[in-house]
Image (spheres, grey):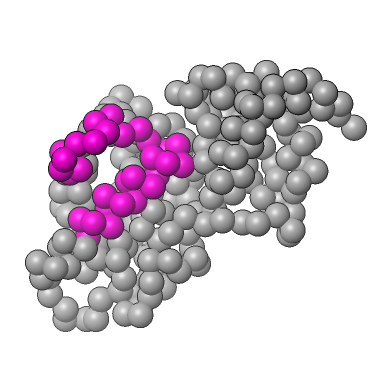
Amino acid sequence: MQDFERLFRQPALLREVNFKLLKGCNISVQDIRLFHFVEEHLEELRQFYEILGYRLIMKHSTGYCYLEAVSAHAPKGRFSRSETFVGMFLGLKFLESGLMETEFIVKNLLQELFQLLNFNDLYTGLVKGMKRGSSATESKNAMIQQKFCTAIKNLAKYGFLIILDEGKMDFLETRIKLLPSLERFYELARRLVTLPEEHARDALLVYLEECGFELEESSDEIEEGGLYAH
């Protein structure tokens, strides 16, 4: 059994790391203080979380870590349908570009989604299923925009991206920086379709179909199919 004495010598850092990981956040090299603590105490932390029913996943090559629940007694959180949908889109965009482009304006990303999917599929992915024959309306467009922006903000809280222009009046004009931890959503997409031979559009559509989100009464809070937070 690992001696945790060294781990507990920095209780403030341990509390901060523990809070983020158990909340389902990624800790990335962008937060060098916390990431360095995890690297320095990796084996102790792995055994510590194993006791609690989690596996600590460390991605040294891309610089981030997170928890994965392995015990039936460990709570499993899921990202919402819209967070998973947007996360898959961003993960596909980020990793299929060969990590060459990481900064984007929110408005441009939303416009790209509108070009990628028809209105009904986009509304289904971000809000809820639409009845066949339903048409786009101003209020539905506004709901898509709201859900997309909210998902971006929430993914930032979980360490998948960084909001570069905090406090900007129009969030659509905000610049964001995508982080390598988005590969977690990319891996979900790869399980749905063969990538990169298939396009991002195919992965998103298969995700909607596999999860049954075409139902009119489906809710954004539905858990089936959402990526596990941990």
Q: Residue furthest right?
A: 1
Please identify the residue farthest to the left as the structure is shown.
138
Q: Is residue 215 above or below residue 104?
A: below
Q: Residue drawn at (43%, 50%), measured in percent from left and top?
A: 189
Residue beneath the point at 73% across and 59% down: 72
Residue 192 shows in this picture? no
Residue 126 placement (x, y as % from top left): 30, 61
Q: Nearer the viewer, residue 44 or 13?
A: 13
> Left or right: where does residue 130 sit relative to residue 195?
left
Where does the N terminus fall, quadrant-wise?
A: top right
61 displayed left or right of 15 = left
**Of 130 and 152, which appears nearest the observer?**
152
Q: Residue at x 73, y 40 (%)?
A: 49
Q: Is residue 137 left or right of residue 225?
A: left
Bounds of the magenta span? 144-173
Residue toward you, 38 or 100:
38
| Image quadrant in which you'd find residue 211 | bottom left
User: Between 226 and 48, which is closer to the camera in this rendering?
Assistant: 48
